[in-house]
Image (cartoon, helix red, strand yellow):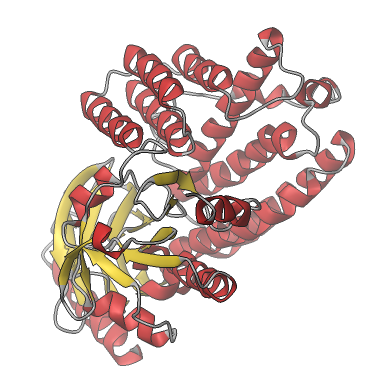
Amino acid sequence: MKLHILGLLVILTLFNCKNDGNNSADNYAYFGGEIMNPNGDFVVLLKSDEVIDTIKLDNRNRFLYKINDLKEGLYTFYHGGEIQMVLLEPKDSLLFRLNTLEFDESLVFTGIGDKKNNYLMNEFLENEIQEKKIFKFCQLKPDTYERRVDSLKAFKLDKLNKFRSKYNPSPLFDKIAKANIDYSYFSSKEVYPFVHHGNNKGDIVKSLPKDFYDYRKSINYDDDFFKEHNHYNSFLRYSVNNFALEDHLQHSTDKEFKRNSLCYNIDRLKIVDSLIKNKNIKNDLLYHFTSIYLSKSNNPENNDAIVKSYLSISTDETGKTEIKRFATSLNNLKEGGNFPNIKIIDYKNAELEINSLINTATVICFWSNQYYNHFKESHYKLNELKEKYPEVKFIAINIDDFGQDKPKASLKENRFKFKDEYQFKNPKESIEALAIQPMTKTIVLDKNKKIVYSNTNIFSGNFEEQLLGAINRK
């Protein structure tokens, strides 16, 4: 691996020297790398949601790509369902190495532009760890909590200042790195009422110091530069949640706040409409909140109501089509209804219809190599349930669309048996028909192939109670 990377660096250096010698324009960058355990044979490079190119991996799972007429800023690269961002500036020659089994954790940059990108990547990973701390801190009283998150922000700023002193980064990097810290801090403030224990959110909101949200006065909720930025988008979502909560508490008659209530979720769409003016940001938030609500709902009438509200506000025709199809699929999976007879393939490459397998209470789960931790944890849980409920059939379906080699290897490497393991024959159509979102979605059927639960989760606290109900159905 080191020799491979070194070789690429030498090539990049020669290219750079040649370009400098010819006095060519400096407005370019090289981007490349090597992918271990690839989930496909290409990498997609994007800027501002527009595809720049689909880059083929060579027979060593490597690629090298020159971006001409570079627009400096954040770029997105996509491989096998995983997405990450890089900062590219003129004359960068950036290489990465990653293992898809630990996509973000294994990602390391070398070459010209590596310091700033490794800094941003490490900050991203550290922020994921700190989010868990924030959730624990949220149980503290507001003033104590505020001191804790202020301390975390000060630590990050000190780290950034040391990086500035050592490497003298560009103003663009400085703008992005500072925004990471600020929006992460603002998010920790916005999330507090939701994570703090207790369902009486009105009392929690009233307990906050008067200046707790003073930073809102300086926020640009239509920042086109940061519209694809992870920290900014997370902040916007938390902010909308909070503004909607404050509005909802003014008219709700519920004794306890229910985040999955139809009323609150429609309030949330209204807040997006009133708060956000940028068309792209608004449409993305509307789509996000509507799809999240639908993915957790089992009520067709409420689904129709939230879709109606979404369609009346959104101007994204593609998003509208996708939401309508998603809602239709969910509503077709009515409890008590027949399960669709989807075609599947076993790992001996035999094709069959899924309903031919169902003659007892059945649990159907889904997994993907793109969510590797979920794949492992869900299979450990399924093995535990199989031991406990031998009268139940447990079916696991891989939803990926890149052949059988990768999922077979994943099962074999983790010593999971191939029994009751399948793939969809037509993944795209099947995923849509079964409305598989999120990946934790689980479907429970009775012995008559009737849907008992169309949208549950094997990790939920009441799942075994639900399973017993399916077993005892006549």
Residue drawn at the location 22% of the way across and 28% of the way down:
321
Residue 405 in percent (x, y) is at 23, 79
The residue at 75%/24% (across/down) is 256
Q: Is residue 183 above or below residue 364?
A: above
Q: Quadrant of residue 183?
A: top right
Report the quarter where the N terminus lies: bottom left
Residue 280 placement, left or right of 70: right
Is residue 377 depicted above or below 124 in this figure? below
Numbered label tally: 0
Q: Residue at x 65, y 27 (%)?
A: 258
When asked about the image quadrant of residue 228, the answer is: top left
Of 466 and 10, nearer the camera is 466
Q: Residue at x 16, y 62 (%)?
A: 425
Q: Position of residue 7 (x, y in %)?
A: 24, 86
Q: Nearer the viewer, residue 69 or 436?
A: 436
Q: Residue furthest front?
A: 474
Q: Position of residue 68 (x, y in %)?
A: 15, 54
* Left or right: 273 as drawn, with respect to 358: right
